[in-house]
Structures are given as structure tokens and as C-alpha cells.
Amino acid sequence: MLIFLGFALLGAAWAMAQPWDGAPDERAHMVRAVGVVSGQIAPDGWTAVGPVTQHVPSELKFDACFAFDPSKSAACLYDKQPIHGQMVNETTAAGRYQPLYYALVGWPLSWMPDNLGLTLSRLIGVLLSAGFVGFAALAVVRWVRRPLMLAGLLLAVTPEALSVIGEINPNGLEIASAVAMWAALIPLVFEDGPIDRRLVWLAGVAAAVLALVRPNGPLEVAEAAVAVLLFAGGTRLKRLFTSKKVWALIVGVGVAGVASGVWTLVLKANELLAVGGHNWTYAQALRVVIADRLPGYVEGMIGYFGYLDTELPATFYFVWLAVTGFIVLTAMVVGSRADRWRMILTVAVTFVPIAAGDVLTVHSLGMIMQGRYILPVSAGIVLMATHIISRSGAVSARHQRAAVGFVAGVVAFEQLWALMYAMIRFQHGLNSEIPLMNPLDGPWHPVIGSPATLALGVVGVAVLLVAVRTAKFTDATAIPTR
């Protein structure tokens, strides 16, 4: 419950801290959300390729004036006057996406196409995502009793993940549901003993939602299944595939995946407009990906805010990667040979598809992949690593508890720092000669004010620290098998 509350408060802080249309594509998702809740589920022009038109309130034509200019604060929004009280046809690049997420979050924005409606719609998305993360924490601490996995969960929900969760963007719910799916699926496959129906339910619901919120969802579910099943032991696989509960999970997720896949194929939801690319060979594109794009993917996974114009200080990325890398390396050292292959495979299914996507679309799209796109799969890296360490017995229970506390402290500090830095970007603008460090000042402020927004973040990280401090860290090996 406390993990849910902590992430809900942090997500709410991000929802407040970001202005109208505060990130790439948010307005496109806003238009799609209002269109879906008004009945435009499969809009006109759905058989063609490219953006589609939805009939929405004219206020949604009001776009960001600070986009792609990090020196410009969001105060320029005060100088713009949206058109009120009319219905217009507005194109959206998200008009072909699966409707589930938009149907859940779009109602307030449909009723009130203004800052209040946007904030309420964002908060619905925050609560949904925090719910999945909360259930993931419940699973690893109470059901599976692998509390070290709590450290993996804290690292899986990066500042970038929270910034997306605080926007109108199905990518946020995609990330959160994926975290819950991995948190249930890993112990479901690798733990000994009877199959826990609670894990089956969590894995099934989370995987079904993941499959249904974005075109990439079915692929991400399949990647997770391959990563956990390929090197699973034969005895466990036999038990899994002779269980009616597991077959119910497989059928349910399969139906969701097929439905999502059919939607994607029929409505061409995964086809983007050609915007012009580079005149490189595929071999040259691969070299660019390895030398230049790969570091950008990693930074984008941790935090790259605004209109991809707000890069955090380099130390921020170093600390997050140092902690994550140490956990992954420890898992590789203490795990079995099969464990090491699992880790290698999970890293591969995280980075190879996005790299291949950039290479294959170099001529048409010009390499547009972002680090946040791989967060639904990269969550499996840290959750699997912490599960391997916990099961190995190589690290004492006392040291595991210390590790969770240390990771929680690092995550709390960096989550708060990222929120403050994003607030500074929107309120002041960046790129001044002397770096600005005051998130409470500036010509633009969130709807509830800067102090209240920052307070939400402070309370959120405090609740997360309390949750870790008060968690019942009982080692799984000391628990009788159910």
C-alpha cells in the first residue's frame, strides 16, 4: 500500500509539474483520448496510412510554444489564447492506437478541455500505473518473499518512467503494467513449490493490459515470455504447462494479444508517416547506432525530459547506472550458468529490437527510437537480477536488507532531483551561463503552485523510504512452501 502511495504521489507531482502539451506527442494523445471517449474509436480514414482526424473541442488545438527550445519557459503559454467553445476536426498521429488507455483516462479532458481537465486525466493515468507498481511490490515482498526484488522494482520505475506516467501517453501504463508482469512472471517460472494463483492473476492481468495499450504490447509480452521460459528447468515447465491456472493465463493473454495484433494490422497502428531520413547504408546506420544512439537509449531510459531537450547532469546518469550495473554484475557472478544466459537474453531482447528499428527505418524516419520505448522490457533486467541474487544464497539476508535500503536512498534522491530539474526547465528555461537551482521560482508555475508540486514529490519519496524501512524482509527460504 505504501509503495502504491509513494509512486502515486510522485506521479501526481510529475502530472502537476509538466505544462500543457509538456512532452512530445502529448497533444496527439490528448486528441485521441477525447475522440475515443466521444465514440470515435475507429475514426474516419482508418484504412489509410498516417494521421487521422478526430472531432474534438477547439481548445485542443492549443499546442506548446516552448517545444524544442530549452531556454524558453512555459510562461509563453500565458500569451496564447485558445479558441473556446467550438468543435473542430483535428489530426492526430495517435489516432490509430488501441483505444483501451484513452477510454480509461480521457473523460475529464473531454468534459473540461483545459488545464483542470488535463490534470485530472493525467491523475487517472497516474493512479492506474501506481496500482500496477503497488501490486508488483506486494507480490515480491509478501507473496514471493523476495524483498531484494523491491530494489529491482525501484530501479525499474525510472524518473523517465514517472515523467511519462504523469503525461497523457499510453507508454506510462505500458511501463507500469510491464513491471507488474515481470515481477509476477519471474518467480512464477523460477520459484519451486506449488503455483501461486495470485501470481498467475497478476501476470495475466498485467500482460493483457500491456498487450492492449500500445501496438508494441504483444511483442513485449512475447519477449518477456521468451526470456523467462527459454532457460527454465524441465520440471518447472512441466508443472506450469499442466496447470489449469497457467493455461487460463495463456489463453487470456493470448486473446488480448491477438485482439491487439488484429487492431494493429487492420488500422495500421504501427505505421508512421515517412518524415525523411538519412542516405546511409544499413551498415553505416548500424555503426551510428553502436557509437552514438546506444548511449542515447540509456539516457532516455533514465531521464530525458521536455521535448527531448532537457538532459540531466552527467553525474545523475552515472550514479543510476553504477547502482544498476553493480546489481546486474553481481547476478552474473553468483548465478548459475542458466541464470547468466537468462540475463544475457533479457538484455538482448531489450536493446536489439530498438537498435534494429533505428537501422531499418533510417531511410524513412531517420532514427526516432527513444529510450523510454524499451522501459517495458528493460524492467526485466533488474527484476531478474535481484531475483537471481536472492535465490543464490550467496548474499546474506542482512546484506540484502542493506542493499534494498541503499538502493531506496539513491532512488529517492535521484527521483526528487529529476523532478526539480524538470520543474526548473519549465519554470525558468535552461542553458543560462550559471545553472539555475531554484524549482520554486520562475515566470511559469504549475496549477497548484510550485511549492505544493515539490511537496508532493518530497512526500512521495519519503513514503517510499518508509515503505522500504517497514517492509517485512523475511527470506523466502525460511518460509514453508504453500
Image (cartoon, rainbow, N blue to C red):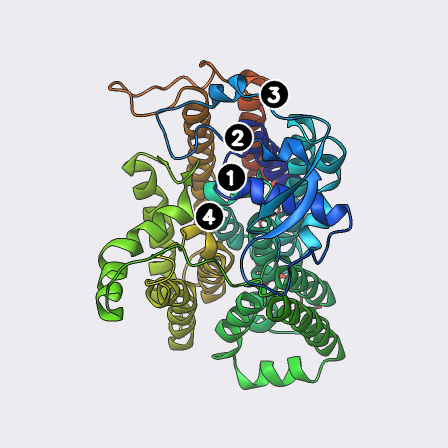
Could you tell me which secondary element the residue under label 4 belongs to?
Answer: helix
Q: Disc 1 and disc 4: Cα gap in Å?
A: 14 Å
Residue 405, position in %: x, y? 47, 41
Could you tell me which secondary element the residue under label 2 belongs to?
Answer: loop
* Nearest to viewer (mark 4 / mark 3): 3
Could you tell me which secondary element the residue under label 3 belongs to?
Answer: loop
Residue 363, position in %: x, y? 33, 63
* Nearest to viewer (mark 2 / mark 4): 2
- The residue that disc 4 covers is 155
Q: Amino acid at mark 3?
A: Val
Q: Give the mark, 3 or 2, whose residue is nearer the N terminus.
A: 2
As drawn, the label of residue 163 is: 1
Q: Give the mark, 4 or 3, whose residue is nearer the N terminus.
A: 4
Q: Disc 2 and disc 4: Cα gap in Å?
A: 22 Å
Give the vertical position of 238 relative to 326 (above or below). below
Q: Nearer the viewer, residue 367 or 154?
A: 367
* Nearest to viewer (mark 1 / mark 3): 3
- The residue that disc 2 covers is 18
Position of the C terminus by quadrant: bottom right
Check contact, mark 2 vs mark 1: CB within 8 A. yes
* Nearest to viewer (mark 1 / mark 4): 1
- The residue that disc 3 covers is 447
The answer to whether any part of residue 474 appears in the image is no
